[in-house]
């Protein structure tokens, strides 16, 4: 399949892995920001192909993982009300709040529905004028345009029984929070390609300059990620701190201007709490005053909530790249995808879930991933072939 198969080609991946090994002379620590990239790295064993000097850290780019527990509890409160149809993407339905998740609210009689788009939720509002239809608007810059469009259309069409529970977060402020932390170890970033499809990559330029850290906008397939790491290491070795674009087949410097326009029309930048990390100034999106009637928190009169995370869970440190999931003392024992203690285990993009799915065997001393074995075999075959000439 075009744009998939060629970016999963073991031979192309091996060439980049070899090139990274050739140019690496010092230890470097690189963070991939996006949970999708984390999953690809762990699934395909990309980190196992790198020289020992390169350390990959997993960043906070999983929107489900960073949605605060308080907001999930608010979602549960709204979803349990008899006059409400509560809608969400499927990945939020299993995320535990303090005492329950949306699926258990549904099992208890709540009208909770999975939708594929906020525009589907808007349609439900049109079809059910006697119900309040709420959409759980979670995500980074990637999901913001469609959520903004749903609110904009609701306003244009005068639909009054539709609202969104907003938990939008922005990547650059989180990156700056990591860089300015006293515990920061990150020397270069792989920026998430899909976020940059929407917003471009201009915002990273001042960060690269201020902190002397390279950024490489990177895609999600194994060859993309290896090429992104190669470009980051090359900058580090050459003493450069610039913003480069590996994902040229999808990302333009300015991003998608129409998408940015609808985001600006409906949302404004606000402070946001990130689960496991805490409040980060100007790191989220909230509805502008002109669209305040579509804010579910206001519509349902939800006040401030403060909820404690389970004390065993170190997902905050995982999300900041300070610890790896398998350094958590309850990883795979008290905390599993069936009984998650933190959102990084429940979300399909969470680092703990990725390690549980693809790296659990390391804990009991089994093999490396399928893809890295495939590349290692390709590499050995090439060495044999060269020797035969
Ligand atoms: S393994 Fe579970 S308890 Fe440990 S950090 Fe991950 S989500 Fe939290």
Image (cartoon, rainbow, N blue to C red):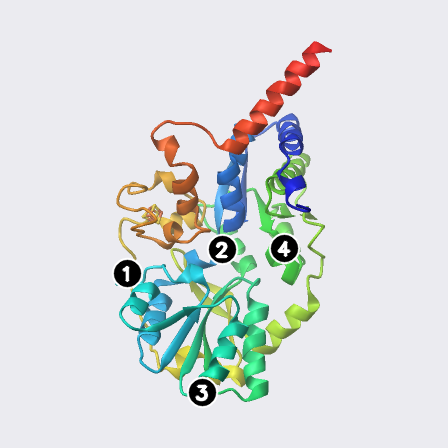
The tag on residue 177 is: 2
Separation (CA) of disc 2 from disc 4: 13 Å
Q: Position of residue 337 (x, y in %)?
A: 34, 49
Q: Secondary structure at mark 4?
A: helix
Residue 219 visible (yes or no): yes
Question: Nearer the observer, disc 4 or disc 3?
Answer: 3
Question: Nearer the observer, disc 1 or disc 3?
Answer: 3
First along the sequence among labels 2 and 1: 2
Separation (CA) of disc 4 from disc 1: 33 Å
Separation (CA) of disc 2 from disc 1: 22 Å
Q: How many other residues sit within 10 Å of disc 1, few (<14), some (14-19) or many (≥20)?
A: few
Mark 2 near mark 1, Cβ–Cβ under 8 Å?
no
The tag on residue 308 is: 1
Q: Residue at x 50, y 67 (%)?
A: 284
The tag on residue 47 is: none
Residue 171 appears in which quarter of the rendering? bottom right
Question: Nearer the observer, disc 3 or disc 2?
Answer: 3
Q: Position of residue 355 (x, y in %)?
A: 41, 41
126 versus 345 height, above or below: below
First along the sequence among labels 3 and 2: 3
First along the sequence among labels 4 and 3: 3
Separation (CA) of disc 3 from disc 2: 43 Å
Q: Residue at x 33, y 70 (%)?
A: 76
Q: Residue at x 43, y 71 (%)?
A: 87
Q: Secondary structure at mark 3?
A: loop
């Amino acid at each position: 399949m075009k744009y998939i198969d060629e970016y999963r080609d073991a031979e192309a991946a091996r060439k980049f892995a070899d090139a990274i090994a050739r140019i690496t002379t010092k230890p470097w620590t690189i963070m991939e920001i996006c949970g999708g990239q984390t999953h690809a790295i762990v699934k395909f064993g990309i980190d196992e192909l790198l020289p020992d000097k390169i350390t990959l850290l997993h960043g906070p780019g999983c929107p489900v993982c960073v949605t605060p527990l308080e907001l999930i509890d608010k979602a549960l409160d709204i979803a349990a009300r008899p006059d409400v149809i509560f809608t969400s993407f499927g990945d939020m339905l299993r995320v535990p709040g303090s005492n329950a998740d949306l699926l258990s609210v549904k099992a208890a009689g709540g009208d909770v529905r999975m939708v594929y788009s906020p525009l589907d939720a808007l349609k439900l509002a049109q079809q059910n004028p006697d119900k309040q239809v709420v959409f759980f608007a979670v995500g980074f810059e990637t999901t913001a345009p469609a959520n903004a469009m749903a609110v904009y259309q609701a306003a244009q069409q005068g639909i009054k029984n539709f609202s969104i529970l907003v938990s939008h977060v922005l990547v650059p402020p989180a990156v700056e929070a990591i860089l300015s932390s006293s515990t920061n170890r990150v020397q270069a970033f792989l920026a998430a390609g899909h976020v940059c499809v929407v917003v471009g990559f201009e915002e990273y330029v001042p960060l690269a300059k201020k902190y002397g850290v390279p950024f490489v906008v990177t895609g999600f397939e194994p060859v993309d990620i290896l090429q992104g790491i190669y470009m980051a290491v090359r900058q580090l070795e050459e003493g450069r701190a610039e913003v480069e674009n590996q994902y040229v087949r999808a990302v333009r410097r300015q991003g998608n201007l129409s998408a940015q326009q609808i985001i600006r029309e409906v949302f404004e930048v606000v402070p946001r709490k990130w689960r496991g990390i805490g409040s980060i100034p100007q790191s989220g999106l909230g509805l502008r005053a002109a669209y305040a009637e579509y804010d579910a928190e206001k519509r349902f009169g939800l006040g401030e909530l403060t909820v404690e995370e389970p004390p065993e869970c170190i997902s905050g440190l995982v999300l900041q790249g300070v610890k790896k999931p398998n350094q958590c003392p309850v990883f795979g024992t008290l905390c599993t995808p069936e009984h998650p203690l933190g959102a990084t285990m429940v979300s399909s993009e969470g680092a703990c879930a990725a390690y549980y799915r693809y790296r659990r065997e390391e804990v009991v001393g089994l093999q490396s991933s399928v893809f890295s074995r495939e590349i290692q075999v390709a590499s050995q075959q090439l060495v044999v072939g060269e020797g035969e000439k």
